[in-house]
Amino acid sequence: MSFWDCVQRAMDDPDVAMNREHGERAQAMWSELADAYERQGYTRHNAEALAAEDVKTAFKRQNAEQRHVWIAQISAMRRNEARLLKSKRLETVVTDALEHAANSTNREASLIGQQRALVRRFHHKLRSVIRHHSRDLLGNVRDPAKLRNVVRELHGESTGDHAAYALADAVRQSFEDMRLMFNEAGGIIGKLENWGLPHRHNRLALRKAGFDDWAAEIAPRIAWDKMEDRVTGRPLAEPGDAPAPDVQQRVLREVYGNVVFGKFDPDQMSVPRGESLWRRRSHERVLPFRSADDWISYNKRFGSGDPFAGIIAHAHTMARDIALIRTFGPDPIRGYETFAALAMQRAKEFGNAQLAAKIEGSADHGRRMLNIYRGSLVPAGPMQETAATFMSTTRHVLTAALLDRAVISAVSDLNSMRMAAKAVGMNSENVISRHVKLMADQMSREEAARAGWIADTLADPGLALSRFQSEVPPAEFAERLSSGVLRIQGLAHWTDQARTAFQMEFAGLMAANAGKPLSEVQPELRGLLQDKGITDAEWQVFTAPETLFTAGNGATFASPIHWREVTDMPSAQADDLFLRIQAMIEEQTEFAVPTNSTWARAFIEGAMPPGSIGYELAKSGLMFKSFAMTFTVNQVRRTLAQQSLPQRIAYGLDLAAGATITGALGLQLYELASGNDPRDMTQPEFWAASALRGGAFGIMGDMVDSASKPYRGLGEFAAGPMLGLGQDVANLAGDAMSGDGAEFAEKSLRFVNRYLPGGDLPLAGLALDRMFLDQLMMTIDPDAVDALMKQARKRPNAPRGSWWMPGSPAPQRAPDLTAILPNK
């Protein structure tokens, strides 16, 4: 009797409790596998026997996997039920689970807080690779030859390069820790030896080549014996061998379909984009390569990014996915919807229709936040993908052209750092002084790295850019250009050290309270710890003397990153405690040095796919407003979190006063960088402009400031600089057709001056203007410089003089710093 007949008899027997659906699936699987074995040369009898063993193995494996996944999903649901019961703000509990708000009563680490905590931990584990191979100012990876040796070592090939072996071992161990943490959370990723590097496919390249050319390129490069059958878990081929051609075609069509078509893949064998995260992540390493050279060759033609980018991208996506599973379970979308439904059910139990409506709106907003966080919004087709890439590339080039003095605006961080430090009970002067020391002292930065704080932009150059805009991937040259300009002017360094300084001082604050019962810990810190459900026993374990980091000068720091590496607590408990404390620090760091707010972005993004007209209009309108939006949202939330109206008023006034002072500093630095003397600081107009520039009035201040500039106005502010670029291009095209060569040349030069990437870098941009562009302008039109000077003098509250006059190839004098005082 065949296996098929045995299953059929069991299904037909009323005394046997067999699920008919499972039985029919087992029969279909058995028939398919038996036919496949027979095509490989086995006799029919042996083929059927092998197929029967495979089906039994597959069902055992499936049952074990489902048990693991369901336990994790139920655990996540129970945690979210507890979150609901403890929440005092049920109307926002869903979005609070995604991103921490200042006035939340979130007893768990937020999704984004956990993701940032994990990224910081993974950066620390990969610190040797980041230190040796991070990008230079031009966006090139350092020491590419050694990096290729690292790739070879990761594929199990001995290069004789001991340094490369050590770096590869660090990557391998880090990836293994990520895999174990993912599985501990509820995912399933099998262990593969020497599997090499994760691969990021270039969808456009695959689509252009077509399946046949792509398959012909990749099939001989794959180590088929390292791939496992998803049904049985057994290798697809014997060592050094390959499976039957039809099996290869089936696997490759599945991969090609998912990369090129995504969720619209017409191939029924493909893995749908909406598949549970635990299963989708386990499928992402299905293409191990035979050798490092095979990986490198394939990557050149069909890849996206170099090996360093692949290592960092894998760490970041694993951090994202681990946080998703921990928060909403192995099936995050289902987990989120269950959570939202539970919140709605609570409102119904209270009989509060108004609360239910607020929860419904919050749940919709959370769905958009989740779409942004997961990166699940992708262009719907080739035309939208082309449009999205073109528009993103254009915005990156504009960023390089118009944000080349962004570091001057970043002085406003000093005020937000001061306010954030006060809110958690830290000495704000210590935070600022720590920032200055880290900016200037390489030894201090190295000591910070040993304690766990790796400069974020060394691993991810786009972090500084994300403070002003967040984008879909542009053309590579545009990404290098925009990140390079922000790094050259020092914004990346400023941001890195500001965030590190805040975290170090926070760790110092916790070390100062080490050993105390939680009830005696400084009140502000105690409140934050209790908000994350930290118990007294956990606090004592975390601040045990042997786990503190001791600096060279004897200072101690309770660094969660360092603690996680040295603690002997069981890994699951240690991960949980680490994530709650480090996420708490990350959430507070975001108040100190804002980058971007998913909550704010979801008001405009998260519903439309990139490349669509609505999405591109929204992105253009949002351009350069991420910082203003994040700053405004953070401070409004923190103001409302104050316990009484007088406290809210006091907080708002303190914030406005500090923002005005930092705005004044930024305003004067901007004038100096423009070749002007500083403004008269005794005039009311100066302080009004300082309040707007410093962010004292948030995004409303930007709108008022824009309305006062006739060359820009509210219209361009709302539509973004893409509108201004379009108008300038149209005007230039009109001038070109007018036939006036001199006028066209002059206006072309003005266009270049405005949109030249990096053309206004502090001091360097001024030198370029005066020594080259002005001279060229005077050659075309001798009266051009006089026109520029007249226009400059017409500006409201203009400086009284210039230390480097327009048209002059060299400065006339040093800046007159006494200009800040009234005329005598």
Image (spheres, grey):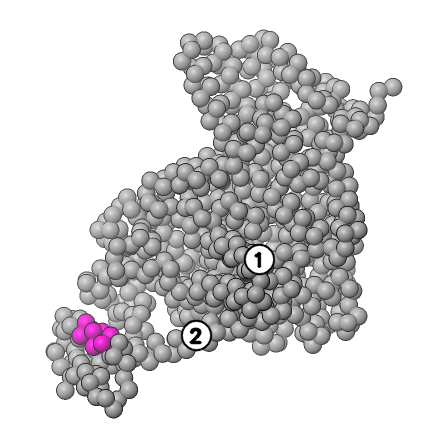
Between 276 and 762, the one lying in front of the other is 276
Left or right: 402 as drawn, with respect to 679: left
Q: Magenta stretch: dominant SS?
A: helix
The C terminus is located in which quarter? top right
Q: Residue furthest bottom?
A: 15
Is residue 373 something one can see in this rendering?
Answer: no
Q: Assign a secondary structure to mark 2.
A: helix
Mark 1 nearby-residue class (10 Å; few <14, some 14–19, many ≥20): few
Magenta span: 24-33
Residue designated by label 1:
354
Q: Assign a secondary structure to mark 1.
A: helix
Q: Residue at x 16, y 78 (%)?
A: 47
Please count the marks in the image. Answer: 2
Mark 1 or 2, which is nearer the eye? 1
Name the spot of residue 678 as percent of width and height, x first: 75, 27
Left or right: 197 as drawn, with respect to 625: left
Q: Residue at x 33, y 80 (%)?
A: 60
Residue designated by label 2:
70
Q: Residue furthest right?
A: 824
The N terminus is located in which quarter? bottom left
Q: Amino acid at mark 1?
A: Gln
Between 597 and 172, the one lying in front of the other is 597
